[in-house]
Image (spheres, rainbow, N blue to C red):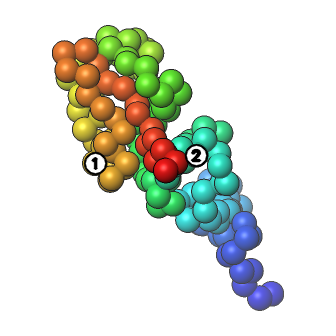
Amino acid sequence: PPSPSFRDGAAQLLGVLPLAERGKVMVIVGHIQEAPDSVAPPPAAGESDGLVIDHAARRVWADRTPVRLSYQEFELLAHLASSPGRVFTRTELLERVWRSDMHAGSRTVDVHVHRLRRKLGGLGRRLATVRRVGYVYRPEQAPAPA
């Protein structure tokens, strides 16, 4: 029979392993899925002037460009963006984002915010530092009408 197309989730043969019982084999089959980053951002799913946070799919786009974030980076961004304008102390962020990691310190928050800013490019400036306190998410303000 002709080889199946490996598009659209068709099964792909990954391997054949001989079993201890004579003449028997184990066939390992998998499915091909489209890479998550190639999917266009959903319209207005948590969009805030260029930043899209899709909580259900755990994906982020900055100016319609997919952004790869670690689990903690996503959690931190989602938490800060959930309350724009609210200042979160480093201690609050550690308690709410790093819940179970007792070894995380305030510098952990600083390092993750630094990485987020870098990954978000120009939109990273929305993660503002409040000296000696913590961080705040400040969405871009639309220009006032003339």
At label 2, which amino acid type do we have?
Answer: Glu
Q: Please tell me which residue lies in front, 144 or 6.
A: 144
Please say whether residue 87 is visible from this viewpoint. yes
At label 1, which amino acid type do we have?
Answer: Arg
Please say whether residue 54 is visible from this viewpoint. no
Q: Please tell me which residue lies in front, 100 or 130.
A: 130
Sequence-first tag of 2 and 1: 2
Mark in the foreground, 2 or 1: 2
**Percent position (x, y) of residue 32?**
64, 65
Element on which disc 1 rests: helix
**Percent position (x, y) of residue 93?**
38, 18
Q: Is residue 6 left or right of residue 96?
A: right
Q: Please tell me which residue lies in front, 128 or 120.
A: 128
Q: Is residue 1 left or right of residue 14?
A: right
Which residue is identified by label 2? Answer: 47
Q: Is residue 37 above or below residue 88?
A: below
Residue lying at 36% horizontally and 26% vertically, measured from the top left: 136
Q: Quadrant of residue 19?
A: bottom right
Which residue is identified by label 1? Answer: 118
Residue lying at 33% horizontally and 53% vertically, measured from the top left: 122
Q: Kindly identify which numbered label has been placed on residue 136.
A: none
Q: Is residue 94 above or below residue 17?
A: above
